[in-house]
Image (spheres, helix red, strand yellow):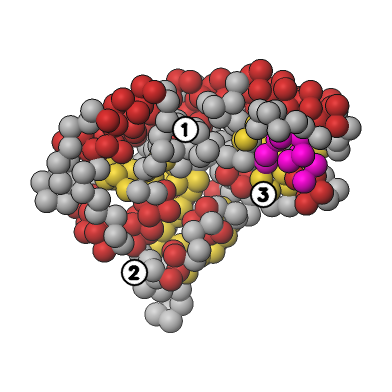
């Protein structure tokens, strides 16, 4: 049991980070305007820079990644269209059915037969099926990829597999949306710029509050005509913020910190290796997410909590996420407490 003054170590998510002083100063001094009426100047700078970083013609800020994905699916799909995505993808299991309920799409999961979070082109082709069927059959019109794949422990789709999946989708006439909530992590893991991982997609979403330290915000990017339609959809969904430059300023600082993410990956490898030495069954993290199988999830989480270590669950496993607000010393301290506590 820890004492009341023991430091709490929060591994639940890389969304728990706090804006640091530099980010807060940027937010406080941001040049702002009415983003619905005239476009906020700081928001405009963010959208232009994010589009360039992602290798897309244009981008639109959204309050959340879920809204960014929903906007993309709403623009791409007609009611009753079928879309496919890797099993466990965020658009399938973490967005409250909005892809079906609001965007009107019929979701269908793809098995991970190329590795965690990654279907093979053959699986994708089989799921799409033959073109030109009877009028009463489902039309498959969209492929949604996720890089990194959260539910698979932050697994990465490498560029050559991405290209093969896009080629298969294009041959069948599908559009492609990439949920890149943690695309920054994928890029850091591969040693590539984010734009190298968006080649050929119609649209991509990316998040500033997962790993990069911003308090809120995502973007959805694509062609200029897509963004024009997306802006109207964002307004329908209640995302038309006014002086959004206060939030955009934080996201601009966040974009400067993509290069820091490899440190979080090192922390995850340290944590995974340390847990393995203590007898835990853990994955080898590709990015900043460590998944551990345990005999009893609730008992393990309660025991960790008593040690001042906070984790979450995902797919029947304990989920630890390293981030910029946890140092390597904090990871080592967590391992020390777990060892002293005799867990698992």
Q: Nearer the viewer, residue 25 or 67?
A: 25
* Foreground of the two, 25 or 79: 25
- Circle 3: element type: strand
Q: Is residue 223 left or right of residue 196?
A: left
Expressed as whole percent of the image width and height from the top left, the position of residue 302 reads 77, 46
In magenta, the rendered stretch is 302-311
Question: In the image, which disc is placed on residue 5?
Answer: none
Q: In the picture shown, does residue 188 fall above or below 89?
A: above
Q: Quadrant of residue 61?
A: top left
Q: Secondary structure at mark 2?
A: loop
Q: Real-space Cα distance between discs 3 and 1? A: 23 Å
**Front in this rendered view, residue 261 or 75:** 261
- The residue that label 2 is drawn on is 78
Please give left or right for residue 233 compared with residue 33 in the image. Answer: right
Observer-side mark, 3 or 1, equals 1
> x%, y% of residue 226?
24, 52
For residue 250, which quarter of the picture? top left
- Outermost residue, front direction? 4
> Is residue 305 on the magenta stretch?
yes
Residue 298 magenta: no
- Name the residue located 71 percent from the left edge and 33 percent from the top edge: 4
Crowding near the residue tagged with mark 1, few <14, some 14–19, many ≥20 C-alpha atoms within 10 Å: some
Asked if residue 276 shows in the view, the reply is no
Question: In the rendering, which numbered label is found on residue 314?
Answer: 3
Residue 205 locus on image (x, y percent): 38, 45
Tell me, yes or no, whether the two marked residues, 2 and 3, touch with CB atoms within 8 Å. no
The quadrant of the image that shows the C terminus is: top right
- Earlier along the polypeptide chain: callout 2 or callout 1? 1
Q: Is residue 321 left or right of residue 282?
A: left
Residue at 77 percent across and 39 percent down: it is 306
Marks 2/1 in contact by CB < 8 Å: the verdict is: no
């Amino acid at each position: 049991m820890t004492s009341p003054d023991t430091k709490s170590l929060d591994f639940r998510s890389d969304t728990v980070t706090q804006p640091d002083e530099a980010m807060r100063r940027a937010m406080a001094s941001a040049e702002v305007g009415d983003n619905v009426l005239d476009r906020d100047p700081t928001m405009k700078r963010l959208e232009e820079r994010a589009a360039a970083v992602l290798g897309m013609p244009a981008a639109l800020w959204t309050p959340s990644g879920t809204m960014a994905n929903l906007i993309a699916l709403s623009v791409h799909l007609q009611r009753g269209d079928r879309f496919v995505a890797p099993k466990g993808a965020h658009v399938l299991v973490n967005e409250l059915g909005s892809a079906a309920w609001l965007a009107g799409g019929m979701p269908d999961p793809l098995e991970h037969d190329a590795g965690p979070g990654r279907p093979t082109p053959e699986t994708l082709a089989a799921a799409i099926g033959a073109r030109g069927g009877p009028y009463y059959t489902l039309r498959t019109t969209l492929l949604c990829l996720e890089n990194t794949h959260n539910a698979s422990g932050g697994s990465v789709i490498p560029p050559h597999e991405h290209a093969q999946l896009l080629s298969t989708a294009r041959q069948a006439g599908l559009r492609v949306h990439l949920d890149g909530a943690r695309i920054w992590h994928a890029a850091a893991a591969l040693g590539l710029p984010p734009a190298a991982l968006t080649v050929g997609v119609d649209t991509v979403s990316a998040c500033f509050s997962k790993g990069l330290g911003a308090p809120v915000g995502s973007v959805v990017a694509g062609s200029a005509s897509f963004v024009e339609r997306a802006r109207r959809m964002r307004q329908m969904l209640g995302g038309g913020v006014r002086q959004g430059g206060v939030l955009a300023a934080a996201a601009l600082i966040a974009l400067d910190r993509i290069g820091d993410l490899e440190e979080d990956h090192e922390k995850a490898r340290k944590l995974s290796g340390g847990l393995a030495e203590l007898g835990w069954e853990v994955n080898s993290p590709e990015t900043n997410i460590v998944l551990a199988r345990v005999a009893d999830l609730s008992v393990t989480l309660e025991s960790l909590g008593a040690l001042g270590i906070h984790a979450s669950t995902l797919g029947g496993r304990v989920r630890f996420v390293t981030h910029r607000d946890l140092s390597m010393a904090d990871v080592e301290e967590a391992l020390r407490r777990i060892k002293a506590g005799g867990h698992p």
